[in-house]
Amino acid sequence: MNADRIFGIQSAGEFEALALETFALQYRHVSVYKEFCEHLGKHPSQVKGLREIPFLPIDFFKSHKVLSGELQPEIVFRSSGTTGSIRSQHYVADLGLYRESFTRGFEHFYGKPSDYCIVALLPSYQERSDASLSYMVGELIAQSTHPESGFYNPGETGALLERLAESQTKLLLIGVTFALLDLVEKPLKTIPNAIVMETGGMKGRRKEMVRAELHSILSKGFGLQEIHSEYGMTELLSQAYSSGQGLFRCPPWMQVRIRDTEDPLSPMETGRTGGVDIIDLANQHSCAFIATQDLGKSYANGTFEILGRFDHSDIRGCNLMAL
């Protein structure tokens, strides 16, 4: 499918039309998704609207190769998981589509990466060549024109941030939760020119905490009113972003739906807690319709928040703190 159609969506009608077309294609070509839909009795000829499209449980990415049958992957991204857990695998057939998705998504909310000095604190991801978050941030750093953009450890970052603050450089500091907390344990000069963005994840390094507590600590430590957040996962090629208070927005080719926790085929009304379903139309070659194990709420203004995870689901690294 032409990438311009995916990233050029401008209306709800265009989104629905492309989603239905994507559903029909993936029904035909992604065998595990077809089997799942057949089990539910959902054939493209019977599916006439977004509310009728089945969402594939995310655990299928652990047990099956979710990929259009005729394609070969350029790369396989794997979730971090926990010790002894089975890791999700996302077989990505078109890295160019992934790069275009995360670049356009970033530009939609923040402007061009070349306008920023991008400082990344992703120690648990940087060590892994199969981490999609590390790949994404590395590519955004490559698009930055600032000589000090790069991956850093908390111990070497404080002086750099103070120097950048004095120069009034437009700064994006993106990091996993535990690394950002490590950084603010030592006094820092305020950096009012910075966007601080957490991607979630304690990775067993610290106790989990509610988002309000975390953002209060980080806001005080960095001298900022709001802490930004990124919501993404191995199984997606697109990301949602929050500019504060844990309220996320999706780019035009991505939508979040909330399902009934007792009846996964039934959507929930806005403002009520349920399971998070995601439509990511950049996922053309795997599955664009994913039922996650996250709990959340959606709101009438198009925002959503993540409230935690279903009981007994694996701990993941992307904004999964309970409120």
Image: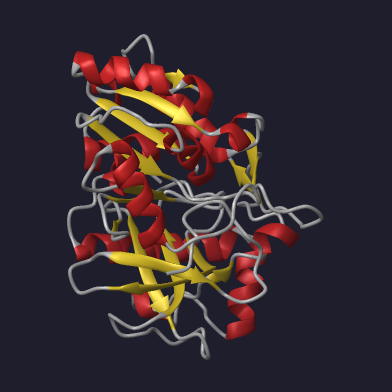
Q: In the shown orientation, is residue 273 left or right of residue 90?
A: left
Q: How is the image coloured?
A: secondary structure
Residue placed farthest to the top in the image?
A: 147
Query: What residue is drawn where x is 57% and y is 63%?
Result: 28
The number of numbered badges drawn on the structure is 0
Front-most of 115 and 263? 115
Front-most of residues 49 and 293? 293
Residue 39, picture quadrant: bottom right
On the image, the x and y values in percent for residue 261 come to 50, 85
**Vertical side of 107 occupied by 247: above or below:** below
Q: Is residue 56 left or right of residue 323?
A: right
| Residue at point 41%, 45% (across, down) | 198
Can you give x and y, in whole percent of width and height, for residue 80 in the image? Answer: 66, 47
Give the quadrant of the C terminus: bottom left
Residue 281 lies in quadrant: bottom left
- Farthest residue in the right direction? 84
Is residue 18 rendered to the left or right of residue 123? left
- At x 25%, y 39%, the residue is 223
Q: Is residue 201 above or below residue 122?
A: below
- On screen, 94 above or below 210? above
Residue at horizontal 38%, vertical 31%?
A: 187
Q: Report the front residue among 64 and 267.
A: 267
Q: Position of residue 263 (x, y in %)?
A: 51, 90
Q: Nearer the viewer, residue 196 or 284?
A: 196
Spot the residue most to the front.
Answer: 187
